[in-house]
Image (cartoon, rainbow, N blue to C red):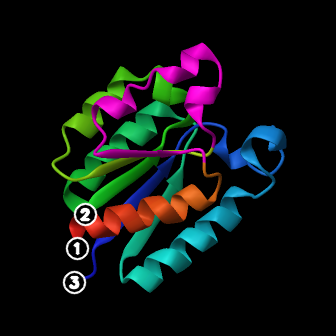
Amino acid sequence: MTAKIMVLNGPNLNLLGTREPEIYGTETLASIEAKTHARAAALGVEVDFRQSNDEGELVTWIQEGRTDCAAIVINAAGYTHTSVAIMDALQACDIPVIELHLSNIHRREEFRHHSYISLAATGIICGFGSHGYEVAVEAAAKLVG
């Protein structure tokens, strides 16, 4: 049975390619998704790639992932710094969690330096732009392989 890795994307990531390209680049989320699927296939794992602007929907998906997936990769975007609910859901998982950010959050505004997601994460990848998704899937695949 092929391991499935859930890749979750939080608010405003649907605007990638046009939103603050000097920070987030010009690549769209659809393009990142295609590259993530390709990398996963090369590693022999499956990816379930999703995006929502809704905190509650992300929590529901995390709860689904507890039993349906071998690992979770999450770019919680702005919820990284505010969501105790997402942190609690991730902490309830007994699977690896990879926290992911396109930019290096530690070189940005002070409020971005704190991450609730980090308290639940097995590891963190930040600052590599869209390539971070491929790195995160590779890391998750190694953890569950």
Name the residue tied to disc 1: 145
Q: Earlier in the sequence, mark 3 or mark 2?
A: 3
Q: Which element carries disc 3, helix, strand or loop?
A: loop
Whether residue 116 is situated above or below residue 141 in the rendered picture: above
What residue is shown at x 73% (from left), y 44% (from top)?
24
Q: Which residues are magenta?
A: 103-127
Q: Which is more N-terminal, label 3 or label 1?
A: 3
**CA–CA distance in space, label 1 to label 3:** 12 Å
Residue placed farthest to the left in the image?
94
Q: Secondary structure at mark 2?
A: helix
The x and y percentages for residue 56 are 42, 33
**Tag shown at residue 113:** none
What residue does disc 2 label? 143
Which of the two marks, 3 or 2, is nearer to us in this view?
A: 2
Q: Residue at x 39, y 75 (%)?
A: 46
Q: Residue 85: x, y in percent?
A: 34, 26
- Front tag of 1 and 3: 1
Tell me the distance, in whole angstroms, between the alpha carbons under discs 3 and 2.
Answer: 16 Å
Q: Which is nearer the eye, 125 or 94?
A: 125
Q: Are marks 1 and 3 in contact (CB under 8 Å)?
A: no
Please give the label number shown on residue 1.
3
Vertical order, 2 against 31 (above or below): below
From what the image shows, is residue 6 above or below residue 75? below
